[in-house]
Image (tube, helix red, strand yellow):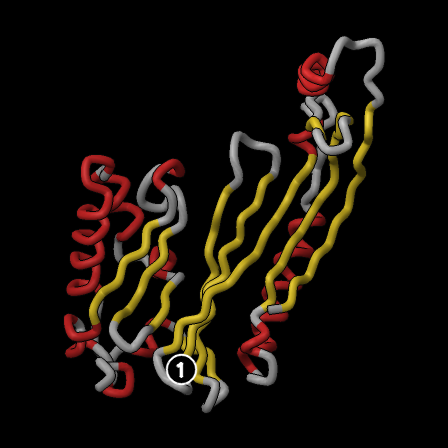
Amino acid sequence: MKRWFWALGAVMALAVSGLGGVFAQEEACYAKNGIWNADETRCEMQSGVTVNVVYPMELVGTGIAEATTDHFLNETRTLFIQSYTPDWSLPAYANHWSQTITYELFHFSDEVLTVKFAVSYYTGGAHPNLDFQTFTFDVAQQQALALEDIFQDGVNPWPALVPMVQADVAAQLGEAADAQWVQQGTAENPDNYRNWALTPDALVFFFPPYQVVAYAYGPVTVEIPLTAISRLLKPEFGPQP
C-alpha cells in the first residue's frame, strides 16, 4: 500500500506558566480548547485541513480501474480542501478538518473486481461522518460495471431483491430498527444501492451511517447469496463453482 498525505494548517504551542503542576496546566489547556501534549508538556491548538489517503496499489497497471481510482481520489480530496470554511468563533478543534480515505477489494473472479472506498471526514461537528464509494470493473474487457449490468436483460430485480435486503437489515438492527427509516433507505431507488460489490458467493450492499439507522449504530452491510438470486443474474455473474 502507498499512503498519500496532504496537510494544510498550523500547530500552536502555548507556554503555560505560573500554574501549579502538570494537572493544572492540562486543565488550563482544555479550557483554552487546546489539546494537551503530555510528552512535550505543552498545549497545542490545531487548525487547517488534513487529508490521509491509502492508495490501492493492487490496481496499478489495470487501466480503467487505476484511472477511475485516480480521478475519484484526486477529486474527493480537492473538493474537501476547497470546502474548508473555518469559523474562528468556534473552539480550535472545530476548525481542524480531516479526511481519511481507505479501501477494500472484493474479487468475484480474476477478471471482475470491486474496490470499496470508505471516506471518513470531520468538519467541526459532534463527530466524524462516513460515506462509501464503490466501483466494479471487468478489467479483462476494460469496462466499468453498473449494478444493472449483472442482471439479465429485461429482468426487474427489485421486487425480489428489496424484500431480502429489508429483512436482513431489520434482523441485524433488531430493536434499533425503525421501519420507516429502513424502508426509505432500502426502497427501489438506485441511489440506495449505489454501493455494492460482487464476491464468488454474494451480492453485497454497503449502507453508510444515517441511510438505514442512526450514526451510533454504524454502517450496515448486507450480503445476498448469489444462489438466492441466480435466476435474476446473467450466467457470467451467477454462483461460482
Query: Residue at the spot x=25%, y=74% of the render?
Result: 201
Q: Nearer the viewer, residue 48 or 3?
A: 3
Residue 11 lies left or right of residue 233; in this view the side is: right
Label 1 CA crowd tier, 10 Å (few <14, some 14–19, many 20+): many
Quarter of the figure with the C terminus: bottom left
* Residue 231 x/y as whole percent: 15, 78
Q: Secondary structure at mark 1?
A: strand
Residue 57 lies left or right of residue 142; in this view the side is: right
* Residue 161 x/y as whole percent: 20, 63
Residue 144 lies left or right of residue 163; in this view the side is: right
Tell me: residue 92, above or below residue 151. above
Query: Residue at the spot x=76%, y=27% of the render?
Result: 41
Q: Nearer the viewer, residue 75 or 200?
A: 200
| Residue under label 1 | 112
Quadrant housing residue 155 = bottom left
Q: How many marks?
A: 1
Query: Residue at the spot x=39%, y=62% of the render?
Result: 194
What's the amino acid at mark 1? Val
* Residue 53 x/y as whole percent: 62, 59
Tell me: residue 147, above or below residue 237. above
Quadrant housing residue 138 = bottom left
* Residue 58 x/y as whole percent: 54, 77
Tell me: residue 131, above or below residue 85. below
Quarter of the figure with the N terminus: bottom right
Query: Residue at the spot x=53%, y=48% of the render?
Result: 120
Residue 39 lies left or right of residue 151; in this view the side is: right
Tell me: residue 239, above or below residue 223. below
